[in-house]
Image: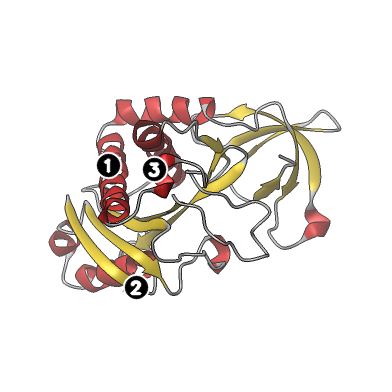
């Protein structure tokens, strides 16, 4: 793993995609050389989530990093990247902080009912129109922060204000952030490098979901509230699709869109 650290950057995903695009022009061997490169930052000035939404990325309270995945074969099921990353995050948060992390389909990790992590996987199309590399961005709120009003109701941190780990100061915070980014990235690469580990991670992804059995609102066309409908979550399948039952009894497997749930 090649770990590169920035004090501040616009976006680790944006930088990863710039590097992927640049090396792809030199040929596939150059692109493959980027595999397992991790770009981490203490702060992002233009962090983003899905649909180019801003991702709050202040200094000192979190870690923001992107793992570049450029395998020998094309990436056929990009949804598995997000699912694998979510599992890697939950495993590391458990090991580092004893946190009981859960997953909200499709790309959010929650602790104590609050979103503490967002994941954004962005693919790069090769000359044949297939995905030949991906930037898997992960942003985690580790320490308490003053969140902007628009996200304060749902955003949280892994550690609480009264946690002894949160009260420690000095270089310990920086070391924890760096070590966490490296640990999650290594876990992610280990999963993606083995089909049997991917299958096991998908089972874990489903088991870690806290929305199974819950009543949700599905928004299939993001931003279009008129397209929303109510459903009950039945589970998550082997392709990381959300299985739901509508009020009329019909069932669907969702691979995209958004859901909302009262937590």
User: Mark 2 or mark 3: which is in front?
Assistant: 3
Question: In the rendering, which numbered label is found on residue 183?
Answer: 1
Give the Cα separation between the discs numbered 2 and 3: 26 Å
Q: Residues within 10 Å of mark 2 (few under 14, many from 20)?
A: many
Q: Is residue 118 above or below residue 200?
A: below
Q: Does the image show residue 81?
A: no
Q: Does the image show residue 220?
A: yes
Give the Cα separation between the discs numbered 1 and 2: 21 Å
- Please tell me whether mark 2 sits on a helix, a strand or a loop: strand
Give the side of residue 78 with respect to residue 185, left or right.
right
User: To which residue does mark 3 refer?
Assistant: 165
Q: Residue at the location (36% across, 49% down)?
A: 168
- Picture coordinates of residue 131 (x, y %)? 36, 56
- Please tell me whether mark 3 sits on a helix, a strand or a loop: helix
Q: Is residue 48 above or below residue 255?
A: below
Could you say which is closer to the camera, residue 235 or residue 108? 108
Give the Cα separation between the discs numbered 1 and 3: 18 Å
Give the mark nearer the N terminus: 1 vs 2. Answer: 2
Could you say which is closer to the camera, residue 177 or residue 36? 177
Question: In the rendering, which numbered label is found on residue 9?
Answer: 2
Image quadrant occupied by the C terminus? top right
Q: Which quadrant would residue 134 be assigned to in this image?
A: bottom left
């Amino acid at each position: 793993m090649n770990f590169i650290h920035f004090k501040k950057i616009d976006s680790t995903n944006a930088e990863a995609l710039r590097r992927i695009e640049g090396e792809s022009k030199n040929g596939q061997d150059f692109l493959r050389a980027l595999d397992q490169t991790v770009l981490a930052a203490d702060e992002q000035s233009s962090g983003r989530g899905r649909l180019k939404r801003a991702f709050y990325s202040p200094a000192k309270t979190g870690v923001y990093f992107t793992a570049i995945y450029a395998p020998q074969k094309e990436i056929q099921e990009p949804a598995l990247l997000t699912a694998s990353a979510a599992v890697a995050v939950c495993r590391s948060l458990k090991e580092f902080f004893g946190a009981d992390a859960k997953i909200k389909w499709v790309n959010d990790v929650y602790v104590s009912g609050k979103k503490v992590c967002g994941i954004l996987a962005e693919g790069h199309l090769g000359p044949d129109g297939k995905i030949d590399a991906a930037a898997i961005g992960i942003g985690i709120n580790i320490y308490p922060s003053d969140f902007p009003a628009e996200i304060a109701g749902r955003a949280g941190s892994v550690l609480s204000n009264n946690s002894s780990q949160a009260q420690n100061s000095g270089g310990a915070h920086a070391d924890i952030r760096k070590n966490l980014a490296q640990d999650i990235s290594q876990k992610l690469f280990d999963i993606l490098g083995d089909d049997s580990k991917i299958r096991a991670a998908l089972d874990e992804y489903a088991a870690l979901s806290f929305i199974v059995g819950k009543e949700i609102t599905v928004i299939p066309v993001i931003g279009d509230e008129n397209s929303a409908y109510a459903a009950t979550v039945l589970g998550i399948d082997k392709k990381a699709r959300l299985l739901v039952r509508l009020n009329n009894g019909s069932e669907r497997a969702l691979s995209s869109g958004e859901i909302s749930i009262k937590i």
